[in-house]
Amino acid sequence: MDHLQIIVDEIAEEMALAVERGKVADYIPNLAAVSPAHFGMAIVSVDGSVHVAGDAEQAFSVQSITKVFGLTMALGAVGDALWSRVGREPSGSAFNSIVQLETEKGIPRNPFINAGAIVVSDILLARYEPREAIAEFLRFMRALAGDDTIVIDDHVARGEEQTGFRNAALASYMRAFGNVRHPIEKTLGIYFHQCALAMNCRQLALAGRFLMCGGRNPETGRSVVSPQRARRILALMLTCGHYDGSGEFAYRVGLPGKSGVGGGILSIAPGIASIAVWSPGLNERGNSHLGTLALERLVQRTGWSVFEPVSPDSGRAGRKIGSHFVD
Ligand code: GLN
């Protein structure tokens, strides 16, 4: 068995035995029913190899991880004009917080908090009809993962439509500032359907490949975004991808990552690997408790942190795994 498979298997074993598993999100009806016993992990390496362990083939609700892909699509549609409506600073506040919007005149701090992603959905509506935007988003995800079986879970989307009062408040508030420009039901319709995407760890890690490869989908050879845009999306993931837990995630894991309230995390080791983990129990900031721990273990054992020194000739991709001390 190869070295990386041993690492992934050992991490999955440790996570299966963990007693402290966090708390499953219960404010979205369908998520409350998911067992915290799950743990899955998938690593797609730059050479195309895939290593999986645990429940890596079981679909879960991708939720806020989709904000990375929604942003990618909206940047493709309107380019850097997007940044006149959304900031690029960590918020230091909860993912669904409204407080900064008053003093900052309806401009959300970044595209990865709920308010920011709702504006991104509104931007997509300027280009597409609602149904078309959702269909286009799904097509985009299927193409990135190279998997046409990926679907949006309508029950999850409907459940959120019925209970998403905070998101409705955010959208309404930003509409008052003119930063949501369409009827809020339409904008939220895109946002909730995007969040309700169902994928497993393997599919998610495959969808993240373009971010590990400087913007190019290694399977098709096609450019999804420019290398500069890929770097910038990764920078936002590192600084804002875990809300008010982003500093802690960078400290512990040291990789760009985006979490979702369904318990998934997509994390990218640029030039090395695209990694997806899933465990539904969340910490107090709404990020997967065991998912974070698993990524921390992975980085301790592989040295994949973006802050690891590399020699100028070998580069990051040239680094051997498991060749350093665990701290
Ligand atoms: N759909 C969820 C919400 O709007 C997404 C939040 C998350 O994953 N952190 O609350």
Image: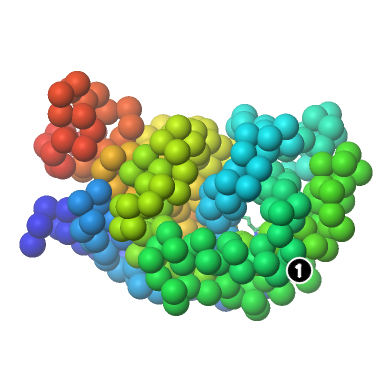
Given the current orientation, which residue lies at the most extreme right position? Answer: 176
**Relative to residue 46, is residue 155 drawn left or right?**
right
CB at disc 1 and ligand 1 closer than 8 Å: no
* Residue 90 position within the rendered picture, expressed as x and y whole percent measured from the top left: 60, 32
Given the current orientation, which residue lies at the most extreme left position? Answer: 1
* Residue 233 position within the rendered picture, expressed as x and y whole percent measured from the top left: 50, 39
Q: Residue at x 78, y 42 (%)?
A: 98
* Residue 283 position within the rendered picture, expressed as x and y whole percent measured from the top left: 52, 51
Query: Quadrant of the image for the C terminus?
Result: top left
**Relative to residue 281, is residue 53 drawn left or right?**
left
Which residue carries the number 1 mark? 161
Q: In the image shown, does 170 or 145 lie closer to the viewer?
A: 145
Q: In the image shown, does 51 or 125 lie closer to the viewer?
A: 125
Is residue 195 at least partly visible in the picture? yes
Given the current orientation, which residue lies at the most extreme top position? Answer: 312
As displayed, is residue 307 above or below residue 249?
Answer: above
Q: What is the total number of numbered labels drawn onto the structure image?
A: 1
Element under disc 1: helix
As displayed, is residue 244 above or below residue 188?
Answer: above
As displayed, is residue 297 above or below residue 192?
Answer: above
Q: Residue at x 16, y 35 (%)?
A: 319
**Relative to residue 149, is residue 318 drawn left or right?**
left
Type of amino acid under label 1:
Glu
Q: Residue at x 32, y 52 (%)?
A: 221
Query: Quadrant of the image for the N terminus?
Result: bottom left
Q: Quadrant of residue 158?
A: bottom right
Q: Answer with the quadrant where ligand 1 appears in the image.
A: bottom right
Q: Residue at x 74, y 36 (%)?
A: 85
* Residue 188 position within the rendered picture, expressed as x and y whole percent measured from the top left: 76, 60
Is residue 249 at least partly visible in the picture? no
